Image: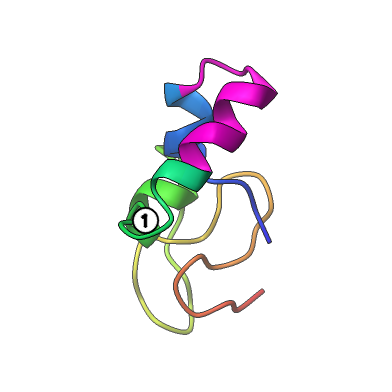
Amino acid sequence: MASCEKCWNDAQGRAEDYQQLIEERRDNPCTPEEQAGEDATECSKCKTMTMHQYAKVCTKCGSK
């Protein structure tokens, strides 16, 4: 699973803070677009801007 780029940015790159945000947002997670990051690209399968900017996996449908 790719990291959530919104949470990582909100945690300012601090791993402990990132983990805390993930736990706090478990019941109301970030959108697939937020998880994919600002430089996400379009997924060829589901046609949304959810291809993770680093992991290159879709945060919506899981396509690679």
Most common SS among magenta residues: helix
| Residue 30 appears anywhere in the view | yes
Q: Is residue 13 above or below residue 28?
A: above
Callout 1 amino acid: Pro
Depth check: give the residue in front, 17 or 34.
17
- Identify the element where label 1 is drawn: loop
Q: Residue at x 30, y 57 (%)?
A: 28
Q: Quadrant of the C terminus?
A: bottom right
Answer whether residue 21 is magenta in the image: yes
Q: Is residue 62 above or below residue 56?
A: below
Q: Is residue 54 left or right of residue 48?
A: right
Q: Position of residue 51 (x, y in %)?
A: 51, 60
Q: Is residue 26 left or right of residue 54?
A: left
| Residue 40 appears anywhere in the view | no
The residues colored magenta run: 11-22
Q: Is residue 44 left or right of residue 1?
A: left
Q: Is residue 56 left or right of residue 11?
A: right
Q: How many marks?
A: 1
**Residue 10: quarter of image:** top left
Answer whether residue 17 is magenta in the image: yes
Q: Position of residue 12 (x, y in %)?
A: 52, 15
Q: Which residue is mark 1?
A: 29
